Image (tube, helix red, strand yellow):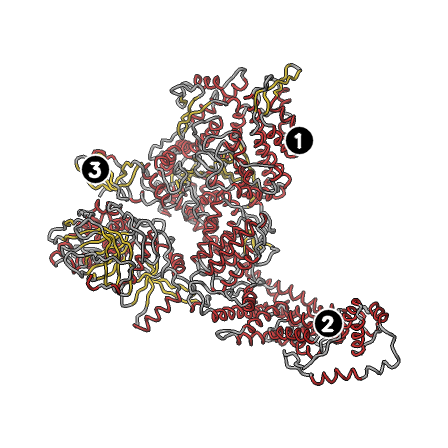
Amino acid sequence: MRRLWVPHPDQVWAPCWLHDSIDGIATFGTEEGEALEIPAVGVNDLEEVHQQQVVGEEDVCLLDTVTKAALLHTIRVRFSKQLVYTWVSRILLAVNPFQVLPLYSSQVLDQYRFASEVRALPPHIFSIAADAMSNLRTSRRHQAIVINGESGAGKTESAKLIMSFIAEATKSDSQEQTQSFEEKVLRTNPIMEAFGNAMTVRNNNSSRFVKWLNFHTQDGRLVGCEVQQYLLEDTRICSVAKGERSYHIFFQLLQARQSPLLKDLELEGPESYAYTRCGELTVPGIDDLQAFEELKEALDALGIGKSTQAQMWQILSAVLWLGNCRFSSEAHHEGVKFEDERPVQQAARMLGLQIEDLKKCMLVRKITVGKDLVETPQRGEQANAARDSLSKYIYMQLFVWAVESLNQTLKVDSSSKSRTSETQALGILDIAGFESFEHNSLEQLLINLCNEHLQQFFNNFVFRSELEDYAKEGLSLDCEVNFVDNKEVLQLLDGRAGILDVLDEEVVMPKASDESFASKVKTGQAQHPRLVKPKTGGKLLFGVRHFAGEVMYNCEGFLQKNVDKPPEDFIKLIPSSSLELLKELGKDSEVQPSQASKSGGRKPKSTSAKFRLSLRQLIGKIDVSDPHFVRCIKPNTEKVPNKFNSPLVLEQLLFSGILEAVQIRQKGFASRASFDDFLKRYSCIASADTKTLSATDLVKHLMEKLKLDAGGMQVGKTKVFLKASVLDQLEAVLAASRYNMALRLQAVMRSRQARKHFAAARPATKALKESLRRVGWDDSSNVERLGVLVDKLGSEAKAFLAELRKAESALPNYPSSQRLRETAQAITARLTKELQCVEHMERLEKSTDAMEIEKALARAEGLKLPKTPLTLDLRSRCKALQVQMPLKQALQSAVNDEDSDALARVVAEVEKKGLNLQVKSWLLELDMAGLVEQVAAKTQPVKPQEPTAPTPTPAQPAEESTVEKKPSPFRMSRRSSRRQTFTGFSDAQQLQLLASLEQAAEELDSVIMEQLLEQAMRNGIDEADLQEYHKLLCRLQDESFLRSTVEQVLEEIKGRCPPRNALQKLQNLSHQLRILHGDAELIRAAARGAQQGTRKRTKSFASNADPSRRQSVLDVSNVEELRVACESFRDLSSFSKLKSEGTWKGHRNSLLQHVQVDFNGTMLGHSKVTIAESLTHIPKSREAVAVQNFRNIVIWMGDRPAQECQRIASRESVVDIASSDPLMRDEVFMQLLKQLSGNPSPRSEWLGWQLLLQICKATMPSDELDDFVRFFCAQKMRRAPASHAETDASNWEIARIAAECFEALAAALPRPADSDVSGDMVGVLVHLVDKSSQNLFVPVATTLKELSSLMGSRVGVKHWRDFAFFQATNRSDSLRMLPDMLPVSELINMWQQIREATNLRGHLHWLRRFLRPQEMLLAGDLHHAALTFRQAVRSHMGRPVPCQAGAEAEEMATAAALMWLECYNPSQKIKDNDALVCQLLKGQMSGLKPAQQDEVRRMLLAKVHDMRSEFGPRIPQLQRMTRAFALMRCFPFFGAHRWSAKVIAPAKVNAGQMVVNNPPDRFLSVHARQTEPDVWVFVDMLGLHLAPAMTSHTNGAGLWSFHFQPEGAFSMSGSDLASPVSCFTPASAASRRRSMTSDSTFTDDGGSSTVSTAKGRRNLRLHKQVGRLLRWGAKPGVLQLVVHSADIGRSALQTQLVALACPDAMDAAFVVHSSLCESLQIPTTCT
């Protein structure tokens, strides 16, 4: 069957199969099933279709035959697959998708950034940038990236993407967390777009100026950047066409008018200003308010101060107010006046000018007559022109100033220049595309002139210079290349006496007008072939035939626009302004008028002259650079996604010369090099004895050595020419040679470095050992046995510690030195603690804090420090303070309160304690002198007998102390009565305080105990009651006690419901260990134990919890339980999988340089700097992914400047990693929580919470992290502002999102009970259709969807979502589809139950979920294509349906068998007597007699012989697979799931057996003659089908197809569907395609047809009925269907019931449900 390129009304050309040619009409069929008819006489003139032309090649030049049709179809196929980039040799075609595609994430950028060979990767905009950067480093030549195309083709977005790549690839190693230079470069985009971009009818974000961005690099680093702008369209400031809009900055300013920064400007909405309301007010896809925020951030980052920004807003608002100035005629005067004074008053106020002065600039015109200056009033049109001229001048000057300010910030730093290395430049040209509107003026003419110059440069570079070079070197091409030369257009426009020269001359001519200019153009260039004269009227019109089409220009306003003369009166007025920025804007124009008058008769420079001069300079810069071309293509004019207008695209391809470029690249030589350059580059790959060869001899030697094509390399007179294929071979050999050389060099250097390091390690190791021996260490010593280090070292301890640290840091990080390093670290930690304790005690020598002294002494005892005079003094001081401090405070309180009774009571207590009111009996630091005098003055004189009076009083406490000498630990004294303390503390108060102290002691809460003990001592509670608490507090300062207690409590919580007290103990012990800087592992063990115990305790209380919601420790109602839970999960740093902050590598600013930077924040604090490694413990293979993911988060949250497509791609990448990679899930959550902690930017925080919400809805963290995330969200919810004020709006919004995150986590699918520990791993063996298998090691909580993602990564399948898991047992070939959300743990448990019950083993298979009827093999995903093809072959071979259409079945089945044998079993060849074909096709022929089978076998073998030319082994494998797959795809029930079943007679179905809702009373008669026929149940993407089994082949059999409803609501359980709607039409694409390739006919209206088969085969009469599947239901063994169909032979549709006895009914029902969900593109939710 021939396949030809046939003219098509929409596709221009379509690849079609020739089906028939009857009566002079040839009938063709497309892949989509569309029929085309053309006269048969023209068939031979059509071009043949090659398979390579229809698969969507990445490089068009790789096509064997390139035609217009092949070029267009290649781009169309790639566009349909969302592959918008295509190579044409070294030219990149970029089709604007008009949607955001996930193609620009950090992972993709790094893939091209670090690629050794960029061309080996798929075409991408990053490919061009990477190629330019590579050439910049290797050739040391300037590079230029030229981006052109029509308006709206995506040039600006492409330029920004290239900028992003260059900024990332040249990122400097900044040591600060500030804006790097590269980020400043990216910050220029919002500024340039705001001031220079606007909405046009062709483009929503059209650049209205020419931008040349020049990057300056040095040694691979970006050292400077320069922005040059040309020809901003000033007329757009004052007026725009219908469907367009003025510059974005005006609308951004007006949308943000409620901002506190802009309220003083008194701005109104855009509909209130004449300059903005004349066009569109909004732009689809652009948020002006958000863009204004980004603009402010960019201005701040680039150093433009707040005051300057405020003046910018004033000037812009002045322009808007000027546009509202309207004029009316004076009653008795010649001039005009303002209709409303408010606009001009507001404009004057904004500009800082006097109102009357500004009025004169618009109402009065000044004329110089001789030496006199005459003022004349202006007419209405003159005043309007003056107003607009004023507005345009102000805006243009502001734009120029903005660009200059950017250049000052980004200029090349002279201090960074190196004397030894040169600076290279990389330029990016972004211009307005070729334009043709209804009204085209001077701006369009100049823009199109720029495009013409760029097209000429492209022609010269690709065509003319190449052909001239061939002729000069004596070479010839195999073909003739004709390209569209636009030299004539440039001569017409920009040549001598051209149109623009005439325009410049006309400007200075007296009485010149637009009409006179147009007349001169038409008469002077009348014979020019590129000039177009209007056919009717149009005095001001002339046309030009540009390379991209014909454009008619309207000369109205040409002369005025070409006069580059600013408003002189306003320029003179500027110095009087109060705005410094306005004065700066007017500096360049202040002296121009006077200079012009002094310059005699010299004509002033015009707008066109300036532009042409700048354009020549620009082309000159590009000419001295190595160019890289990006051709942007606009797929449709409606700016909508997924629409490809083939005629429009073809027109762009032809006009841009792409087809000719392909031809010259294919037939010509892709590269050339001078003899010297060729020898320098390739002599290294020649043999050792040929190093001195000439270029000619080297070419011959390489041709022989590498066996290159004879014509692939030619020697000219001075150069060597190479074709693309030969160049690739040479470069591959050169790369391999350099790689081998690099390996040898690396081996030499590494061995040298190793010897050097080893030599340096010897003295370091020796010094460290000598230091350690000073404290008694040897190789067999244990650090714990070294004793007290401070005691051994004495006064040299600090010096020894510094020396030890220095020796440790000098020790190289070798495995052999690891044990020595660990010993040194342990001794350092031990000595540090001892020194800290000693220093702390020294600081307490004069302290009055008894509790602090007591803790320090306890800490010293815990460290086993020896007793010294200092410790003895501190101990006695502590005892004295415990007695004296409460007494002092009581005395002070009594004196202050003037309470004589209390004072007497305290004085008595003083004397009881053996003290007196003499200063010398108190500690000096208590400063008792003043207080003693006050007490003495208030007390009575002492009587003589008083010293003996209190003798019985000391005995009273002594007796009490003997009675209550030893209270039980943690139990307060139970004395029947307590006396009031000397401070007035009552009995009840004492009991209450002691009870609290007892509770704190039980919970081991050292912080609360310390506070309560201080309060107890201060209030004079008996020391006997506090003795045990003091002891416990002291023991809590001992690490050994803490360790043993932690181990003890960990044993306590091992039960099913750990006690709350034990959990509280663990939390407090963990907190105390952190205070003492204890063992990090012990701290983590205590925190982990508390978390696990809290979860177990919560689960024991959750027996009545909602099973549809995921349990959490925060789901408790008891306040105490909630407090314990919150304490366990409050601190993110206690997450067990988190790396230690001490060993974490921190942040870095460059992935390339791997340079760590100092960061003042914490490990879990917000950062704009990239992390150096993952936050959590993950496999090493995921470390790079973790770093890239963090960069994606930073980009999405706006902490790093990027354009919208990059931000969205970054967000999608983060969500995809979190949802598909279970090993990375917790890492992604932790990175997000890190960026949300302490985030200073409200917008960044809001975007981060939005991302967290999206991830929470897509997946859930591990059980271990889940409660941390929930507590984090709950914290943000509780911090919501109390008011709804405008300033709190962002906080309210974030709190709302946090609540949604919390609810999403709670509503997530609960994990199985046995997957509680998310860290448990299990091995899963997965079988593939090609008989191979993969063993994956995953957490038990991994779902099958996540496992499928891992399988895709493992086997290299990009479109892994097309696959699902199926279960099988070792005794059954049937496969059961499994739900995506099924956890691996539940699957293993299910297999275990099956094995225990049946002794069968379960197996897991990874197969395509469904094969779609319209599907093609994916050439860009080869592993996907191979697995899909093998599954299709296996399904086709085992298909249990008879061959109904003989020729069709034979052709397709034979092709599949041939492919199966020769592709995958190459050792087996098909022979004439080979019976293997029949064995493979036994399912197809099982209903035939032996004689009929023999005849079919002979016919099949004959088909094999005939089809070898198309499917033989010489054809590339992918082509053979694609052709066979296309044939199999035409077969009925292609790739469908199938089950055997038996129809249940209606008499056997009773009401109690119904499994569907509202079953109909009527039963469908599946078979005309049998009530219980055997059938096969097929389910595919179209619906459910019933086909007769082999035993039911009678004339009464029917072939039933019940399609899904194409739309409408439905029940996810499949039990009910909405009311019926129109079903799929029988004349679908699939049925049309089948009708074209089959000799049989079917009636789709319920009638029957006779199938004509091969000779000798019986005729089968099968009725084909089409209906709709409304509902379905199943229970074990029974499948019931509610269908809307007609009976056999009838046309009346009725709702009927089909009952089937099916062993796999539940599996079939689930597959039906999955198929419906797949067709509607919604997730399968039932399990």
Q: Earlier in the sequence, mark 2 or mark 1?
A: 1
Q: Earlier in the sequence, mark 3 or mark 1?
A: 3
Q: Residue 243: x and y, percent? A: 45, 33
- The image quadrant where one finds the N terminus is top left
Q: Amino acid at mark 3?
A: Ala
- Above or below residue 629? Residue 1614 is below
Query: Which of the 4 image quadrants contains residue 544?
Result: top left
Name the side, left or right, on which 201 lies relative to 13.
right
From the image, tell me which residue sits under label 3.
26
Q: Amino acid at mark 1?
A: Ser
How far is disc 3 from disc 1 in space, using C-alphas?
A: 80 Å
Q: Residue 1335: x and y, percent? A: 38, 64
Name the side, left or right, on which 1168 lies relative to 30.
right
How far is disc 3 from disc 2 in space, using C-alphas?
A: 110 Å
Look at 24% across and 38% down and name the residue there: 36
From the image, tell me which residue sits under label 1.
577
Q: Amino acid at mark 2?
A: Arg
| Residue 1018 numbered mark, or none | 2
Q: Quick one: 189 or 1713, which is closer to the camera?
A: 1713
10 Å neighbourhood of mark 2: few (<14), some, or many (≥20)?
A: some
- The image quadrant where one finds the C terminus is bottom left
Q: Residue 1382: x and y, percent? A: 38, 63
10 Å neighbourhood of mark 3: few (<14), some, or many (≥20)?
A: some
- Above or below residue 36? Residue 1486 is below
Provide the secondary structure element on which disc 2 rests: helix
